[in-house]
Amino acid sequence: MKILFLDCFSGISGDMAVGALVDLGVKPSALEWELSKLALGDFHMHFEKESRKSISGVKFGIHEGATHVEEGGEGGEHGHEHGHEHTHDGDCCGHTHEGAPADEHAHSHEHSHEHSHEHSHEHEHSHEHEHEHSHEHEHEHEHEHEHGHEDKHTHTHTHSHSHSHEGGDCSGHEHEHEHGEHEHEHEHEHGRSHGEIRELIEASELSPYVKKHALSIFQRIAVAEGKIHGMPAESVAFHEVGALDSIADIVCVCVGLEVLGVEAVYVSSLHEGQGTIECAHGTYPLPAPATLEILAGIPLGQIEEGHELITPTGAAIVAEFGVRFGVMPRMKTERIGYGVGSRDLESRPNVLRAVLGELVED
């Protein structure tokens, strides 16, 4: 039986899980294609090869819009560069992600970017003509940028456009992002409720497997949040860009497991950090309320690390797929992947290790 062992020695989040699956061999283009089946509007995915304490893996991220610019080194500006900074401000049940630490400049990054765009626009001209546009095009670009500080960037961009134009809504769960030099064509006034996200997934052409598990993971999060906030699960809101994060993380994990043919997921013992997190409503203890609620019934301990290690999305993923929690089962290892987190931890590399292989029956 093909199994996946998730070694959460440094915690787990949704983006770390996606990164680990890509490092195992899931193609970013496959994830982009599946995610484009949802009416999410414009989004930009990136997969960067990064390291934490000398362990290399894949860092996954997703952003609204198509334009992605960063400042170049001595060579000036490049149209598809990456100098963005992420700040996630969690709700009382959520989590806070600090920006990725600045690594030394004597290393290399490999970036793979996927863009998907869906527009619906109406154009009005002064001479009172109205035009409806429907066009599709795909382009792939590969760029290499040499910078004075010796960073090397390899970019792959895939664009898929379908226009019929009125603007989409990309929203999210308990995160707010600051995306460097991103330009956004659309304004988003509201997030998505759990009920709206459920309808979005149900109406899509995702596979039955992905739909089933994605819906179940969102249900786990919404039930936990609703219980804490004293509201029905259907009314729990995933605000602004964070909903895009949550949808991407959850759907891409489900797609990745299906692509790899995983029949069962085994999970290591779970350990959360100690201390507190600053949220919109004040200072809250670790584990975060939603994380603790989602992991009810699953063994959970704490280690001497003063940061949040397990996010609500990460908790919901292991609660959904984990068939056993504890030591690594006897298995024949085929591949090993690492998903990179955003923190520079004191005691350990902030990575999630995923081991793919065959279960060895005793």
Image (tube, helix red, strand yellow):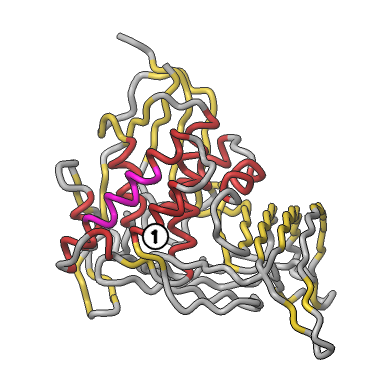
Residue projecting furthest to the bottom: 126
Q: Position of residue 103 (x, y in %)?
A: 58, 64
Q: For residue 225, what is the image quadrant? A: bottom left
Relative to 345, is 78 above or below?
A: below
Relative to 29, is 149 above or below?
A: below
Q: Is residue 350 visible?
A: no
- The residue that appears at 33% across and 57% down in the rendered structure is 311
Q: For residue 287, what is the image quadrant? A: bottom left
Q: Position of residue 262 (x, y in %)?
A: 45, 27
Q: Is residue 168 magenta?
A: no
Q: Is residue 332 left or right of residue 59?
A: left
Q: Is residue 215 magenta?
A: yes
Relative to 245, is 37 above or below?
A: above
Neighbour class for label 1 at 10 Å: few (<14), some, many (≥20)? Answer: some
Q: Position of residue 239 (x, y in %)?
A: 40, 71
Q: Nearer the viewer, residue 149 or 179?
A: 179
- The residue that appears at 71% across and 58% down in the rendered structure is 162
Q: Nearer the viewer, residue 255 or 90?
A: 255
Q: Mark 1 — residue?
A: 196
Q: Is residue 75 left or right of residue 27?
A: right
Q: Quadrant of the N terminus?
A: top left
- The residue that appears at 43% across and 52% down in the rendered structure is 14
Q: Quadrant of the C terminus?
A: top left
The amino acid sitting under disc 1 is: Glu
Q: Main secondary structure of the magenta part?
A: helix
Q: Is residue 306 left or right of residue 148?
A: left
What span is colored magenta in the figure?
214-223
Q: Nearer the viewer, residue 285 or 343?
A: 285
Q: Is residue 284 visible?
A: yes
User: Circle 1 sits in a helix, a strand or a loop, which is it?
Assistant: helix
Q: Position of residue 9 (x, y in %)?
A: 35, 45
Q: Is residue 211 left or right of residue 362?
A: right
